[in-house]
Amino acid sequence: MLYWILGIILTVFALYLLFSFFIFKLFTDRSFSKDIFFKGKKAKEGTASDASLNLDYEEVFINSVDNIQLHSYVLKNLASSNWIICVHGYSGNATNLLPQIKHFYDNGYNVLAVDLRAHGKSQGRYCGLSYLDAKDIKLWIDWILKFMPNAFISLFGVSLGGASALMTASTQTDKNIKCVISDSAPTDFLRQFEHIWSWFIKIPPKIILPAVNMWMKLFAKYSLEDTSLINNIEKMRVPCLIIHGEQDHFVKVQMAYELFEKIMSTKEILLVPDANHTQSVNVRPDLYWGQIDAFLNKNMKTNNRPSI
């Protein structure tokens, strides 16, 4: 009887580890489709060479600190040394932000649109979930400053990209970073994991989280606690604009309030009525771009012609 009991316990434990490993892979591994998180609605993707946008771009590759090749599209307005670094959302790529890229470029900014690790043309098996992404964005800032040391840089991100932009500005001290714009960012990915989990399984997430975290530390080399933006954002020292749709069912609007409250630097918030996750730009483009342009005009003062 004892052997039967031990056998059942070991079997249950093995199934628990196997299931937690599957969950870890589902959330972080680029080879697993993420459509399930968006209820089958795949984000619309464009292409960086879309003729209708008439964008003249370059493709740039650099290596991360852990030797992963990272990719970005670069659009230069050489009459200016003001830059916008655009960061896309979870499971997407830089081309998802073509409307934003075009808007910034048409308004005279140099634009660097990144493919986050394990997304787009960047290498890497596991997502960085803002923690590793912030370290990668720092390298892109360094890349800009190598040939344009007097650059003024604004970070703009959507969803995961918004969290990554905020995390970068909260954990880095580059004086060239002048402001941050975040659209639909979660406070941290531990809470976001719990929220998404509740959609599919009614088992309390705290049961599975320790094992998921173990796999993350083992394979992705960071933990869910490392992705806590809310624990770092008080370090923010540059002006910040938080944007969120009031009808966001994926990242709850309450998270925008929490981030805004924690920010100690100059800050603004835009809550867009009737907008779901990342859809503020489509629901109220006038309101969206009006606030962004005014914010950038205040914080990205005209810079001298760049020294190259």
Image (spheres, rainbow, N blue to C red):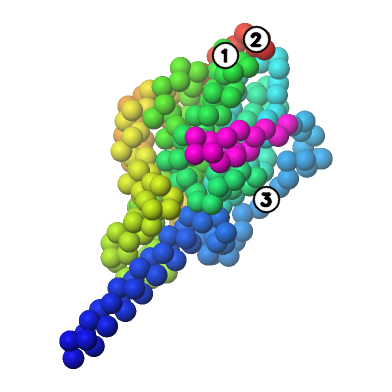
In the rendered view, does 39 fall on the left or right side of 233? right
- In the rendered image, the residue lying farthest to the bottom is 1
Pointers 3 and 2 in contact (CB under 8 A)?
no
For residue 121, which numbered disc appears in the image? none
The residues bearing labels 3 and 1 have C-alpha atoms spaced at a distance of: 33 Å
Residue 132 in the image, given as x and y percentages of width and height? 45, 40
Instruction: Decide: is 10 above or below 42.
Output: below
In the rendered view, does 35 fall on the left or right side of 224? right
Residue 61 seen:
yes
Count of numbered badges drawn on the protein: 3
At mark 3, the secondary structure is loop
Position of the N terminus, as image quadrant, is bottom left
Tell me the residue at 77%/30% (across/down): 56
Q: Is residue 206 magenta?
A: no
Tell me the residue at 35%/43% (across/down): 226
User: Which is closer to the viewer, label 3 or label 2?
Assistant: 2
For residue 307, which numbered disc appears in the image? 2
Task: Give the residues drawn in magenta, as a range.
Answer: 58-71
Residue 255 seen:
no
At mark 1, the secondary structure is loop
Instruction: Decide: is 21 above or below 5.
Output: above
Query: What's the amino acid at mark 3?
Result: Glu
Q: Which residue is mark 1?
A: 149
Tell me the residue at 36%/74% (across/down): 15
Residue 294 in the image, given as x and y percentages of width and height? 54, 24
Position of the C terminus, as image quadrant, is top right
Query: What's the amino acid at mark 1?
Result: Pro
In-front residue for pair 41/283: 41
Q: Which residue is mark 3?
A: 45
Instruction: Decide: is 113 above or below 153.
Output: below
Pointers 2 and 1 in contact (CB under 8 A)?
yes
- In the rendered image, the residue lying farthest to the front is 3
